[in-house]
Image (cartoon, rainbow, N blue to C red):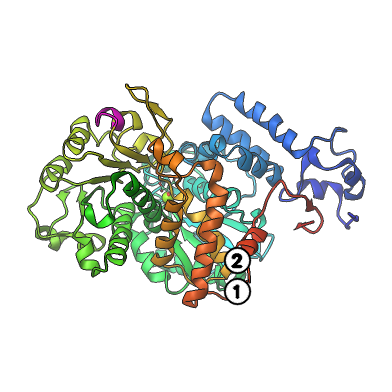
Amino acid sequence: MVSRLPVTGVEVVRDTIRYSGVSTPISEREGLGIRGLVPAAFLPLELDVERCMLQMRSKESPLEKYIYLHNIQDVSERLFYAILCKYTSEVMPLVYTPTVGEACQNFSAIYRGTLRGMYFSLEDSGKIRTLLDNWFTSKITTIVVTDGERILGLGDLGVNGMGIPIGKLALYTACGGIDPAKVLPVHIDVGTNNEENLNDPYYLGLRRPRERGQAYDDLIAEFFEAAQNKFGANVMIQFEDFGNLNAFRLLSAWQDKACTFNDDIQGTAAVALAGLLASNRLTGKDLIDHIFLFAGAGEAGTGIAELLALAIAEKGHLPIEQARKKIFLVDSKGLVTKSRLDSLQHHKVDFAHDVDDCPNLLAAIDMLKPTGLIGVSAIPNSFTKEICENMAAHNKIPVIFALSNPTSKAECTAQEAYEWTDGRAIFCSGSPFDPVTLQDGRQRVPGQGNNAYIFPGIGLGVLAAGSTRITNYDMLLAAETLAAEVGPEELDVGCMYPPLSRIRQVSKNIAIAVANQAHETGVATEQRPVDMGKYVESLMYDPFEEVDVHLGSKK
Ligand SMILES: O=C([O-])CC(=O)C(=O)O
Ligand SMILES: [Mg+2]
């Protein structure tokens, strides 16, 4: 029975987390005090989803669709997530990569003042803990934070990068079942070096060059400490789209002091490793049989390389130093080698091998004859015809991953990778590509090697166990769990990931594995349930389940 709370109907309608719009049963409207505030008809949630999909599909551009979907989120989170859960593969590219990239580029222009996340700037230093009290709840479990410096492969977007934490957290809820009332997107504004932003009269961020001094580290530290104080020591904080200069430093500074991980270093690593593990089922190789060459040696490049080395070392019972010798990186100056050690950034040092220098990717392919080529450079068209042909010349099944985001930054397209390798390549990309029909009529379905397959499950597992820490062993386990979700139907069409329509199930299985591991390694603070599967499922927010609007709990 729904009883009347001492709030006005208008307040009920404005409670966007719980309000169900025209899907509110007629019998409950009186008690909620919303009669007169809603049209007379009742549409079951399923039908309301169809109504919205028709409207959304009538919009011409992906950006208009993005805005429409967020308009719905700003009125009823339940309806928004019902749409996302029912039509995941159609809608995910609109609220997430690649459209979220365009939304970020236009963030200041399309901003409508709605409440979605928190903004802390240098001008707020010393006050963050107090400002957190301005949020409506202290029950936050999951935070995604950015400083906007490396938004996808688009670079420094300043405050406009806030679209990314918002998009990531939408997936935490849609794909990982994290309660939408308990997520918090955060932007830390330390200025921007993007001239276009600085010259835009409507730019909404701090109008100054990026802070590079102690004040930067102090603000990040203040944020972490304030968040842990307000939301509890185990609140999960995901670093997202920080620049190279800070991403590695901050991860190593905080990974032993907070429940945190960096999605671009570690999440991307896990999804790429999963794709490589799945590809072994087609190539017949083990990880240790490969030579991997990376185009790009930033966060994703060295993150994947390091996790891959860990996987090779674990599976092959090798010291990690030996495992790393199977992995080579090319950066803007050519192959990363020992002769360059003096001038190398710290995160590349472990992969500086004792081999001849090579000026570029093509020369490195010629010399090393890699079996796997991983693109993480954000340089579009850098996997040229010659490069793909070269990979095909010395591999029966060349493994080619073009992981840079959004689509405009991919190293090559799916069509190109297949065409230039006589349809033999195993191809994955970070942003979605449509299936391709080869000349011989066979269909190839390029898998989306995007960290969206990883972070929602990690977040849910961490929540289920009450983990105090997240490590690369969690990422390794998540990668193995994801690879095991790839079935023969996917492998048959060359797809290294399960379909997005199964992503909630995948996230759940990752969560179960990660939570069990947390109990085994002693980082869990929750009581271990008898049936972890059932427990994880009970935590998952499902927009289609009936909710007691007053209590916000499952009926
Ligand atoms: O957001 C995405 O699609 C994947 C990611 O983390 C990035 O490219 O930075
Ligand atoms: Mg990212």
> Label 1's element?
loop
Tell me where the magenta segment starts and ends, as one range.
Answer: 417-423
| Mark 1 crowd level (few <14, some 14–19, many ≥20, 10 Å Cα) | some
387 displayed left or right of 455: left
Q: Position of residue 67 (x, y in %)?
A: 59, 35
Q: Magenta span has 546?
A: no
Q: What residue is shown at x 29% (from left), y 45% (from top)?
A: 283
User: Which quadrant, please, contains the C terminus?
Assistant: bottom right
Cβ(mark 1) to ligand 1 < 8 Å? no
Q: What residue is shown at x 42% (from left), y 45% (from top)?
A: 157
- The kind of residue tagged 2 is Met
Q: Position of residue 55 (x, y in %)?
A: 66, 27
User: Which quadrant, please, contains the N terminus?
Assistant: bottom right
| Mark 2 crowd level (few <14, some 14–19, many ≥20, 10 Å Cα) | some
Residues tagged 2 and 1 counted as in contact (Cβ below 8 A): yes
469 displayed left or right of 25: left
- Residue under circle 1? 528
Which of 428/255 is in front? 428
Q: Position of residue 142 (x, y in %)?
A: 57, 60
